[in-house]
């Protein structure tokens, strides 16, 4: 009877204890939200809550750390990657990236978290072209934590999110695990890993993506084709040609042609020549790119005629790029380099012209023309775009022009020039 009375007393007391716990957790969450408003000085008070037994408290602690920001939060967010809750892992991942790329949490996966911790599927395949500057130092422990999540996150969402983060951070040390993730059979993880590999620019990964160029998920297939091209994988050429024989649609055909043009295999010259006057705008653009990169002098008249006859902007930009690679580096408004520079002023075409100029800046003769164009530039978009193009050229001959631009009266142009100088000086060998 004594034991029965004790058990009854315990049972009667449980609702009160649960109520007390619930109220205590509410107070913790209230405190954490206040700490978040206090900023980085409150981080030492936030961190212990990552070990709380209540899941909602731990989630709120991660959100508070992200809101507090600063370098002081990185150690705690790295530790939070080891939590056993998917939402905590996703928020910690995005918080780490947010330190290097402010505002990322408003665009990353954690922005898609629903109240119950789910994710809206459409977010997985939205544009993902963000990346930190190539010279940004990255803490190895952060890379290791994210690699751990790609391999063993508590859900596929967590693993895919971590792969995306590694791409944004350009973590070349993560290439082996990203390649491994391509075999996961999960479309989201494969897609994010492919895009991440594109951002690392590690050509050693190129041969490992070819098997996905016929994937049944078109988004994965297109990403694999694009990755093979960006990484210049000559091993992928036979597979690309097989896809080209019977492409599923125009998007796939275009992606294959662009990839072949990027790889620049001389064996594809006849294919590019056969497409110079193709009725499809994208095919003409890819043909011009391919001929430009092959840089066979005898093809210059063919590309010049196509440039003269062309009326559509996309292929004309590609033809201008090709002509510059083939030796026509005229910077006047009627010349190929001048046309690319003028296109920096158009929002619709800046994103096409800038990559072309950045690639041209890697070659001595076109780079000299771009440096001349920098001195002639009159608009903010031209000056900033040319600075960005020269940032990755790795050549000392671009320093003087950028130093002069860093004193520009337009503060935004001066900042872009200083950024370009920092990146350039760090890459000069």
Image (cartoon, rainbow, N blue to C red):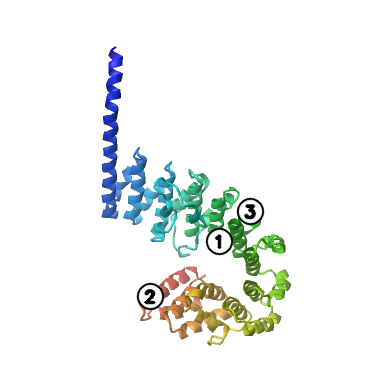
Residue at 60%, 60% (x, y): give it: 222
Examine the image and state in which quarter residue 384 appears: bottom left
Residue at 29%, 20% (x, y): give it: 8
Q: Nearer the viewer, residue 330 or 160?
A: 160
| Residue 169 is at least partly visible in this image | no
**SS category of the residue bearing label 2:** helix
Above or below residue 141? Residue 409 is below
Mark closer to the chain start, 2 or 3 = 3
Judged left or right of residue 164, residue 57 is left
In the picture of the structure, the residue carrying the numbered disc 3 is 216
Mark closer to the chain start, 3 or 1 = 1
Q: Nearer the viewer, residue 283 or 295?
A: 283
**SS category of the residue bearing label 3:** loop
User: Which quadrant of the figure contains the N terminus?
Assistant: top left
Q: Nearer the viewer, residue 291 or 295?
A: 291
Mark closer to the chain start, 2 or 1 = 1
Residue at 42%, 50% (x, y): give it: 113
Q: Nearer the viewer, residue 85 or 206?
A: 85
Q: Pick out the residue farthest to the top.
A: 1
Residue 412 badge? 2
In the picture of the structure, the residue carrying the numbered disc 1 is 198
> Of discs 2 and 3, which sits in the foreground?
3
Q: Residues within 10 Å of mark 3 (few under 14, many from 20)?
A: few
Examine the image and state in which quarter residue 402 appears: bottom left
Name the spot of residue 18 as percent of width and height, x first: 30, 32
């Amino acid at each position: 009877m004594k034991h029965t009375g004790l058990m009854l007393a315990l049972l009667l007391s449980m609702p009160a204890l649960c109520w007390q716990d619930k109220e205590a957790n509410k107070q913790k969450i209230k405190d954490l939200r206040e700490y978040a408003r206090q900023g980085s000085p409150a981080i030492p008070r936030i961190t212990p809550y990552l070990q709380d037994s209540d899941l909602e408290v731990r989630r709120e602690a991660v959100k508070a750390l992200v809101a507090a920001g600063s370098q002081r939060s990185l150690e705690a967010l790295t530790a939070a990657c080891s939590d056993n809750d998917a939402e905590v892992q996703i928020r910690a991942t995005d918080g780490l990236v947010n330190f290097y790329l402010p505002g990322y949490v408003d665009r990353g996966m954690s922005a898609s978290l629903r109240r119950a911790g789910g994710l809206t599927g459409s977010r997985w395949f939205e544009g993902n072209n963000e990346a930190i500057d190539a010279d940004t130092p990255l803490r190895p422990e952060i890379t290791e934590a994210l690699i751990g999540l790609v391999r063993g996150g508590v859900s596929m969402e967590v693993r895919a999110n971590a792969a995306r983060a590694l791409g944004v951070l350009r973590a070349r040390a993560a290439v082996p695990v990203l390649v491994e993730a391509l075999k996961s059979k999960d479309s989201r993880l494969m897609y994010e890993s492919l895009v991440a590999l594109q951002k690392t620019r590690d050509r050693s990964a190129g041969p490992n993506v070819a098997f996905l160029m016929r994937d049944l998920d078109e988004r994965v297939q297109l990403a694999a084709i694009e990755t093979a091209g960006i990484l210049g994988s000559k091993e992928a050429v036979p597979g690309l040609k097989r896809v080209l024989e019977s492409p599923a649609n125009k998007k796939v055909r275009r992606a294959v042609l662009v990839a072949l043009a990027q790889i620049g295999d001389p064996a594809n010259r006849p294919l590019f020549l056969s497409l110079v006057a193709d009725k499809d705008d994208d095919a003409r653009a890819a043909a011009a790119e391919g001929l430009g990169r092959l840089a066979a002098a005898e093809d210059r008249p063919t590309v010049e005629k196509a440039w003269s006859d062309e009326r559509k902007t996309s292929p004309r930009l590609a033809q201008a790029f090709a002509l510059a690679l083939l030796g026509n580096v005229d910077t006047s408004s009627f010349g190929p380099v001048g046309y690319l520079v003028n296109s920096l002023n158009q929002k619709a075409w800046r994103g096409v012209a800038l990559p072309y100029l950045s690639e041209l800046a890697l070659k001595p003769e076109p780079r000299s023309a771009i440096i001349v164009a920098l001195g002639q530039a009159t608009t903010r978009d031209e000056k900033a775009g040319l600075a960005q193009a020269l940032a990755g050229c790795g050549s000392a001959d671009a320093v003087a022009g950028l130093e002069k631009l860093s004193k520009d009266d337009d503060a935004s142009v001066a900042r872009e020039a200083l950024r370009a100088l920092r990146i350039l000086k760090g890459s000069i060998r």
